[in-house]
Image (spheres, grey):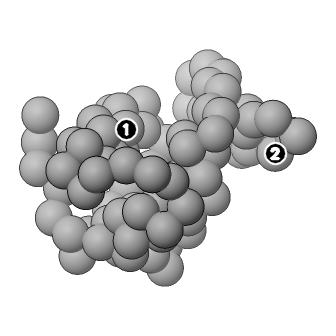
Amino acid sequence: MPVIEPHAIPFRTDQVVWQESDKDIIIRSTRNGTEYSVQNVGADIWLVCDGENSVADIVELLLAAYEVDRDTLQRDLTIFLNDLQTKGLINFK
């Protein structure tokens, strides 16, 4: 699994459109038409992948919102962000 540096800033690519509903966020790749649905923590992460928040910022936001230990959160966040990047939904600056 690739390492994502704490100072990296995730942003949504220009190859996605997304819509927020009451329970989840539907993300569609304009590159291949594939749709993805994220809920709960995944939706919270998607919303802060705005090109402004670093990975370290996102960790702190999630630690404040959820009862989880830092190591577990950082591992799960890295997995989720790598998955979004692999699917072409986000990138990093």
Tell me the amino acid under the disc marked 2.
Glu
Q: Quadrant of the N terminus?
A: top left
- Quarter assignment of residue 92: bottom left
Which residue occupies the foreground of this view, 81 or 63?
63
Furthest toward the right, the residue is: 22
| Crowd band around label 1 with a 10 angstrom C-alpha radius: few (<14), some (14–19), many (20+) | some
Residue beneath the point at 39% across and 71% down: 60
Q: Is residue 74 above or below residue 24?
A: below
Q: CA distance from mark 2 to mark 1?
A: 19 Å
Task: Rate crowding at label 2 as few (under 14), some (14 to 19) or many (20 or more) other CA atoms within 10 Å.
Answer: some
Q: Nearer the viewer, residue 19 or 39?
A: 39
Question: What number is the disc on residue 54?
Answer: none
Mark 2 or mark 1: whose residue is earlier in sequence: 2
Q: Position of residue 77 (x, y in %)?
A: 33, 46
Q: Residue at x 62, y 33 (%)?
A: 38
> Residue 11: x, y in percent?
47, 62
Q: List the single residue furthest toward the front.
A: 67
Residue at figure coordinates x 64%, y 39% from the top left: 40
Residue 86 visible in image = yes
Identify which amino acid the numbered label 1 is placed on: Phe
> Is the residue 4 above or below the residue 64 in the image?
above
Q: Secondary structure at mark 1?
A: helix
**Residue located 49% across and 79% down the image:** 52
Q: Which residue is mark 2?
A: 20
Query: Residue 31: x and y, percent?
Result: 56, 32
Name the side, left or right, on which 64 lies relative to 9: right
Classify the position of the C terminus by image quarter.
bottom left
Report which quarter residue 8 is drawn in. bottom left
Q: Secondary structure at mark 2?
A: strand
Above or below residue 6? Residue 30 is: above
Q: Which residue is mark 1?
A: 80
